[in-house]
Image (tube, helix red, strand yellow):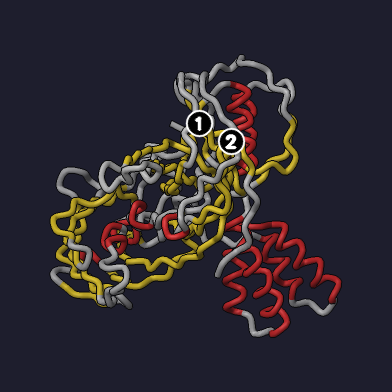
Amino acid sequence: MRALAVPAVLFACVSVALGDKPPLPPAAPGPVVADGTPDPETKKLLDDLGGADWRAREKAGKALEALGEKALPQMKAALLATDSPEVRQRLSVLVRKMDRARLTEPKRVTFSAKGKTPQQAYQEIAKQTGYRVEFNNGADRNGPKLELEFEGTPFWQALDAVATAAGHMVNADNGDDIVRVYNQDQTSPYVAHSGAFRFVATNINSSRNVQLSGINRRGGNQQQNEYMNLNFMVQSEPKNPMLGTTQVELTEAKDDLGGSLLPPKEQNGYRTNYLNGGFRGHNTYASVNLVRADRGATAIKSLKGRMGVVLLSGTVPEVTITDPLKVKKKDFVGRTTQLTIDSVDEDANQKGAYVVSLSARTTAEVDPNRGIDYGWSNSLWQRLELTDAKGNKYFTYGPNTNENNGLSIRMTMQFVPNDPRTGVQYKFGPPTKLVLQEWLTVTHEVTFAFKDVPLP
């Protein structure tokens, strides 16, 4: 499944001042504590969707779509439960459309920031999107008044617009779903936006070759070539976990003298799944190759490209282990994974925390064209979930790995009731279920563009 690309827009961001931490909005991902209470408004609209009046059905469908993400879980449950062909058809269309938008469309903000401080603007962006925007290094509550207006502006563009006006630095590559704004004497001026994605150029590496043998005595055939790599980060909105990217393809690359920087097609870019390691996150890396034809050129006047971003679209349980505290030295087989649970015990050093010791091996065949998929073993710990009887999920900081050859792995993991993002500690019951989730993915094509990037 491939979604339509959203045109890229170049945007510059700057860095400098921030203030005291205000109260934070709630975290963007799903609730920490499970809540199965149906939303009454969504339930009524779902009932209307199967009513006798077609006008009411049309109105209910539009209202459900307007509710967006918060209505999706109930809509999916209703789709599985309904016996009505009419309701099934309407819900199928709506769920597919909304699922795609949930993954690929940016969250947008609409408000006037005129006369507001940067901190007030960040708070409004966080409020409207539900994302956590954290203010670090002491944001100035009485900072410069802004002269900005936002009307359906994508999240990244709005955030970078405020940061640029205030002289702040946006940082979204700390391995979590928090976007931080810093007071640092640094800047990342080469930033491009493409819908729900942000591209940040990080550096250019250059290599020059001069032919020293096989030179024509009469001259004229001595070759001098320069090859370059433009490296950049790809950042997704906090709602959009990425698992990697596909091959980058350049569609345009021109220097400031009008010359082409495009390399031969087979050297256009390279696959970055390996760099991301298969981890779930909001930040990954990519690179494109360039060929410099004229040493007189001083800048990349324009560079355009496209790439596939591999998004986590959902999960399905692959292995489910009930009463894990009673399991010792037992095998469990899933679709592509065999787990051997050595033990699940309460941590002797931390009451309410649990340590899981296990080994796993993949039963999937190795692709001869790509070799061993280390993403499977590297990300195994992110796909393991330990829950109590109420469905509350324990948190983990990652594994201690003893052996990992890509095809099998042995590790121990500590699961704790305190949220590493907020430091809040919860009272969970003893674990009743250990689940290995299988990740479902969607590859979404994204276009991007950089302008006026200096050449070495």
Q: Hey, which quadrant is residue 145 in on the image?
A: top right
Mark number, residue 369: none
Foreground pick, 42 / 306? 306
Residue linked to disc 2: 257
Q: Is residue 423 visible?
A: yes
Foreground pick, 126 / 153? 153
Give the mark nearer the N terminus: 2 vs 1.
Answer: 2
Question: Image point 18% across, 65% down: which residue?
Answer: 359
Q: How far apart are marks 2 and 1 (CA)?
A: 8 Å
**Percent position (x, y) of residue 3?**
60, 64
Which kind of residue does numbered mark 2 sit on? Leu
Compared with residue 225, is residue 298 higher up or lower down, i.e. above or below? Answer: above
Which kind of residue does numbered mark 1 sit on? Gly
**Percent position (x, y) of residue 305?**
55, 51
Mark number, residue 296: 1
**Percent position (x, y) of residue 220?**
40, 43
Q: Is mark 1 on a helix, strand or loop?
A: loop
Q: Can residue 419 be seen in this view?
A: no
Question: Image point 67% across, 45% down: which residue?
Answer: 108
Question: Image point 28% across, 77% down: which residue?
Answer: 365
Relative placement, left or right, of 365 versus 269 is left
Quadrant of the image containing the N terminus: bottom right
Compared with residue 413, is residue 168 higher up or lower down, i.e. above or below? Answer: above
**Percent position (x, y) of residue 393?**
38, 55
Relative placement, left or right, of 425 versus 188 is left
Quadrant of the image containing the C terminus: top left
Is the residue under label 1 in contact with that under label 2 (CB below 8 Å)? Answer: yes
Question: Image point 49% across, 57% down: which residue?
Answer: 309
Number of residues whose C-alpha sits closer than 10 Å to that of mark 2, classed few (under 14), some (14–19) or many (20 or more) = few
Relative placement, left or right, of 414 versus 54 is left
Compared with residue 258, is residue 1 higher up or lower down, i.e. above or below? Answer: below
